[in-house]
Image: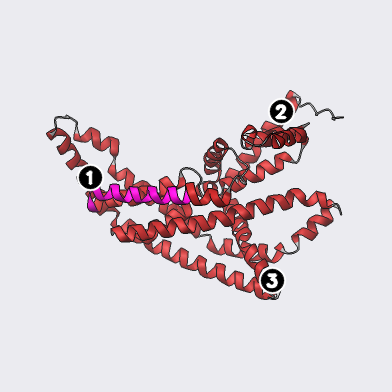
Amino acid sequence: MTTARPRTTVSQMLLTVAAFIIIVAGMQAASPLLVPFLLAAFITIICTPIMVWLKRRGSPSWLALIVVIVGVLLIGFLVSAFIASSVSNFTRDLPAYQAALGRQVTDLVRFLNEVGIEISAAALTDFLDPGAAMNIVASGLNSLRSVLTNAFLIFMTVVFMLMEASGLPSKLQAILGDSKDALKPFEGFIENVKQYMAIKTWISLGTGTLAAAWLMLMGVPYALLWGMLAFFMNYIPTIGSILAAIPAVILALVQFGVIKAAIVGIGYLVINILMGSIIEPRFMGKELGLSTLVVFLSLLFWGWVLGPVGMLLSVPLTMMAKIALGTREETRWLAILLGPDLYSKKPEKVRQAHDTTA
């Protein structure tokens, strides 16, 4: 016998929409404080398995915590120093790159006129706008550097989160009662996010390393910077790897011409197909539990609310929303809409999903 599903009235729907708008507006207003907190939370999620592994190897809790904290501090310092130095040097050289790119556009106009295609140099310059293209690259790097200016706040938040991580399950148990089933949604969410972040981090590290090695082989300036950019941008689903390739291809075009820029672009394409279409699905599988459209829309939404960091964390944040919606009967239908196509799965899984909404 199935229980009747509660009906949602128009007033309840309007109240829910109004509450959602207020929450989103509050998140956008509080983004300077919320972004470092979210970054710290997901760094903690990545570091927690390392601390647990050290404990299982016989290390005391305090020693495991110190090792992880020192590792986070060292990596954060090296990354921040490298990005700050590289971005400063790139900004210094930016006018020369803009001028060289402008000459490339002029040569293109001359070539088109020679083959009988009449086009105005001013019109093509306005369409391509080489100065704006390089400025977009510089502004993106500067936004990344601005995020790292909160490194001390992020680091301190990570330290306190790691200190509290071991006691969190017992606190949740005390809040929700002794029932083990009460903790299952939280445990499932943490486990899914840890698995996703761990796999994505290793895949992103491989992508960034291969991109940097390829650019060094091709002689493209700032190869390590573009490799690190590929590492960070690989966290953005679907379009992150494409966006990461644009600065390196533009710089190769400025320095070496069209042919070598095309070769650099082909190298990026091969790396992204290898890592994103072959290796990552082999380890990630279907565990993400989100449809492709939702992944793309979440990228736009969280990027609008929280900026570049929101794009990096769009998938974990959407997974959190999906799990939260799935815990209540009134909103479980939204969780199903956010998920992948049920009819592409086995029939028994479709029936199980149907039964949970009954």
- Relative to 135, residue 81 above or below: below
Where does label 3 land, which residue? 55
Secondary structure under the numbered disc 2 in the rendered image: helix
Instruction: Return the disc, 3 or 2, that comes first in the chain's sequence.
Output: 2
Rendered location of residue 227, percent (x, y): 40, 57
Q: Residues within 10 Å of mark 2 (few under 14, many from 20)?
A: few
Residue 31 is covered by the magenta coloring = no
Res 21 visible: no
Where does label 1 land, which residue? 102
Rendered location of residue 207, percent (x, y): 45, 55
- Relative to 59, residue 158 above or below: above
Instruction: Return the disc, 1 or 3, that comes first in the chain's sequence.
Output: 3
Q: CA distance from mark 2 to mark 1?
A: 54 Å
Secondary structure under the numbered disc 1 in the rendered image: helix
Where does label 2 land, which residue? 13
Furthest residue to the top?
A: 10
Q: CA distance from mark 1 to mark 3?
A: 58 Å
On the rendered image, what quadrant is the N terminus found in?
top right
> Most prominent secondary structure in the magenta stretch?
helix
| Circle nearer the viewer, 3 or 2 | 3
Question: As shown in the figure, which amino acid type bears the numbered disc 3?
Answer: Lys
Question: As shown in the figure, which amino acid type bears the numbered disc 2?
Answer: Met
Residue 257 is covered by the magenta coloring = yes
Residue stretch rendered in magenta on the structure: 256-276
Q: CA distance from mark 3 to mark 2?
A: 48 Å
